[in-house]
Structure formats: structure tokens, C-alpha cells
Amino acid sequence: MKFFVAGLMLLTISLSALVWHRNRDAGMRPDPVRVEVPHGPERTTKCMVWKAQRGAAVLWLCGSLHTLRASDYPLPAPYLSAFGEAKRIVMELPPDYKPGAAMRKMGWLSDDRLLKDAVAPETWRVITEWTARSGIPLSSIESLKPWTAALTVAEASQKARDFDPEDGMEPWFRARLGRIPAEGLETPEGQLGLFDSLSPEAQEKMLTLTLKEEATGISRIDRMVSGWSEGDAEQLAAIIDEGFAEMPELKRQLHGDRHRAWLPRLEALLGGNETVMVLVGCGHLVGKGSLVDLLRQKGVTLTQQQYSTTRRAPESSATPQ
């Protein structure tokens, strides 16, 4: 089974903290498996950061992983350089959004309906098996819509491997904003609405794909983190295409439509005179139709950054020249 929701939460959407915030209050924090990142000799590799410049304007396009492990810090140096130079920060969501508010408003079933009434009996059986296996209380998800349940399953699975939204890049930078102005490209309601607008059939498919991937998704998550740390845009683009293969319409909604909506704001920033750091999921910066691709089509020159690291190179990756 190809990766699906786990990849969305790392590379594409920044609402995972909204999902977990409510579940955490319900006691859903399984003990994580601590993963140590192997180190070796210092080397140079690419980074998921691109620099664009037009006149007096400088735009740092920084690819985020929305959930990370504590062991993935410190961040590569280009992220810190971009943040240090920036006079303004732009993220997917505004820094002052209220965690959980939009999810409570949109992610729960109404009229006393339960999840078991919204999905097929076989899907409900798999859900109950997953809750028993994971230790997640069934009562904590029985009132969720199928798409919300899918996000919850994916996030609980990630947390079991030490990936935590609270260790994601957005919270790390938000905590250090100080007086730097910051804004969002969209609202939590708009981001969640992408899923809430799915048909009941598509929502259940999203949930079943997530449940199927849960047992085997860790290797794919490792591939995504490896692609991010190596700045391997081609690998990440391939992973995204693979993951959306069964739901191409959702890829259009989550990538194509949003990129076109964000592009005028980025062009306006390039027409100004500020240095701006734009922090969005890595999935928005790689492949055909990405923000990097669209800006290049507009004649903008973007330079991918490099950095020095002692993290051991993946066995499948060649050493950068």
C-alpha cells in the first residue's frame, strides 16, 4: 500500500497539531519508540531551502516537515540563516491560530451520529482492531468524521515512532518569532475544509487507506525524512506522486489549487523590498506544479541551498558532488 495520510501530515498539511491537541487531552499519548539518528564524518548535501531574489526583495522558500523527532534537531543551517535574515515570516497558517478550535467545529459528526454509522461494517471492524492494538481509546474517535479519524490514526502512528507535531518546524519557529511580523497563507478552517468537502465515499477511502498503511508506513516516513534531510526534491516528488495515485482529485485540491491561490502573495513579496522567509510543507516545493516550479515559470531564479552535516548519508543516496 502506498503512503497516504502519513505523508500528507509530514509534507503537505500543517494541521496535525490541531488533531492531536484534542486527543492528547483524552490521554492518547502512547510511549514513543526512541530513534537515534546515526552520525559520521562531516559532508555537504542539499537542503530543502531555495533562495529567490528580485531587486531588493529576497524570498527564502523553506520546506517544512510538520512533524519531527527531537533527534532531527538542530535544523540545517540554511533554515537558520533564512530566519535570521527575515524581516517577515509567512507560514501556511497564521502563528496565532487556536489549536483545536477549527477541528472541534468541523471534525466531529453531528446529530448524535457515530463513526460506525458513517462507514461500512468492515471499516469499523478494522478501526476497532486498530484501537485495541494501539491502545487508543475507541471512545476518543467514535464521534469523529471519517477524515478526522484518518488524521488521528496517522498521527497516533507517527507519535508511536517519536514524531510529534510539537517538535514540528512551525512550533519551533513560532516560539522564536519575538517581534518579527508573521502571517498565514490560509486559515485553519480553509485547510480543514479541503477534507470536510470530500464526499462520504472519499472520506471513507481516505480512512481505509490510512488504516492499511498504518502497519507498513514507517519505512515510507523514514524515506520522507531522509529526502528532507538530503534536500532530495526528486525523491520527495516521487513519494508524493506515489501517495496520491489512488486519490488524484485530492492532490489537485491539496496542491494544485492551493499553489495557485498562494502564488499571487509570493509574487507580491518578490515585488517588494523585504527579506521574507516562507515556511510551507516540503510537498509544496517539489515536482511539477510546485511553488518552485510555478515561480520558475514566471521567470524567477531560485537557488537550492546546501549545508554541512555529520548525519550519515542514506545508503541509497550518492554523496553529493
Image (cartoon, helix red, strand yellow):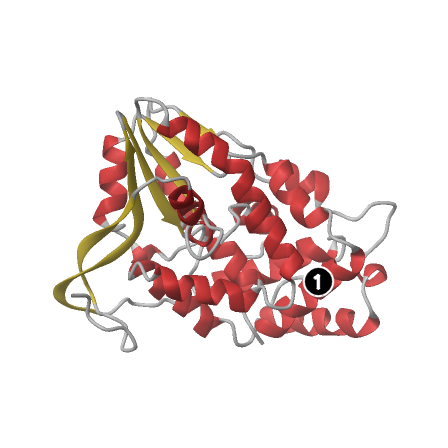
Q: Residue at x 52, y 65 (%)?
A: 241
Secondary structure of residue under mark 1:
helix
Where residue 85 appears, x then y in whole percent? 24, 31
The residue beneath circle 1 is: 138
Q: Nearer the viewer, residue 143 or 1?
A: 1
Relative vertical location of residue 319 with respect to residue 46 in this rendering, above or below:
below
The crowding category of the residue bearing disc 1, from other C-alpha atoms within 10 Å (few below 14, some 14 to 19, many at least 20), is some
Residue 187, horizontal then vertical, whole percent: 58, 34
Question: Which image quadrant for residue 104?
Answer: top right
Q: Specify the amino acid type for callout 1.
A: Leu
Q: Identify which residue is drawn at 62% across, 49% down.
A: 253
Q: Is residue 129 above or below residue 292?
A: below
Q: Quadrant of residue 115?
A: bottom right
The answer to whether residue 30 is visible is: no
- Is 264 or 168 nearer to us in this picture? 264
- At 44% from the left and 62% from the top, the residue drawn is 237
In the image, residue 105 sits, relative to residue 23, either above or below, namely above
User: How far across and down, in percent of the image, does residue 141 sit?
Assistant: 70, 57
Identify the residue at the far right of this view. Answer: 111
Which of these two is toward me, 132 or 257? 257
User: Is residue 116 toward the left or the right of residue 283 in the image?
Assistant: right
Does the rendering let one see residue 113?
yes
Quarter of the C terminus within the rendering: bottom left
Left or right of 206, for residue 41: left
Q: How many marks?
A: 1
Q: Residue at x 32, y 33 (%)?
A: 176
- Quadrant the N terminus occupies: bottom right
Residue 203 percent location from the top left of the image: 73, 58
The answer to whether residue 321 is left or right of residue 185 is left
Q: Residue furthest left?
A: 41
Q: Nearer the viewer, residue 295 or 208?
A: 295
